[in-house]
Amino acid sequence: MANHKSAVKRARQALKRRDRNRAVRSEVRTEVKNLQSAIASGDATKAQSQLRVVEGKLRKAASKGVYKKTTASRSVSRLAKAVAGLGS
C-alpha cells in the first residue's frame, strides 16, 4: 500500500480509471459483437446503422485513452470493410 498522501491519491485514481476503462471496453466489445452478428446474418441496413454506433464508441474510447488511436482506427477500418462487402 502507498505510504505518501499523493501516492494514496494516485492509487485511488488508478482504481477509478481501471473501472471506467473496463466498462467502456466492455461496452465497445458488446457493440462490435452486435455488428458482427449483423454482418453474419447478411443484413446490410442493420450492419450500416450498427457500424455508425460502433465507430462512435470506438473513436470516443480512443479520445479518452481507453484504446490507442491507431488501434481504434484499425478496428473501424476492418469493420467498415466487412460491411462494405455486404453491398456487393
Image (cartoon, rainbow, N blue to C red):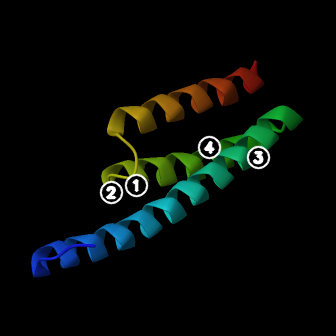
Q: Earlier in the sequence, mark 3 or mark 4?
A: 3
Foreground disc of the pair 3, 1: 1
Q: Which residue is mark 2?
A: 64
Q: Which residue is mark 1?
A: 60
Amino acid carrying label 3: it is Lys
Image quarter where the C terminus lies is top right
Foreground disc of the pair 2, 4: 2
Task: Verify CB contact (< 8 Å) between mark 4 and mark 1.
Answer: no
**What's the CA distance linking mark 1 and mark 2?**
6 Å
Q: Is residue 58 above or below residue 9?
A: above
Q: What residue is at 21 percent from the left and 77 percent from the top? A: 8
**Side of 34 where 60 appears, left or right:** left
**Side of 21 where 6 appears, left or right:** left
Which of the 4 image quarters holds residue 35?
top right
Q: Residue 4 placed where, x, y %? A: 11, 77
The answer to whether residue 24 is visible is yes
Task: Verify CB contact (< 8 Å) between mark 1 and mark 2.
Answer: yes
Q: Earlier in the sequence, mark 3 or mark 2?
A: 3
Q: Which residue is mark 4?
A: 51
Q: What residue is at 61 percent from the left and 32 percent from the top? A: 79
Amino acid carrying label 4: it is Leu
Amino acid carrying label 2: it is Lys
Q: Any mark on residue 46, and which?
A: 3
Task: Verify CB contact (< 8 Å) between mark 3 and mark 1.
Answer: no
**What's the CA distance linking mark 3 and mark 1?**
21 Å
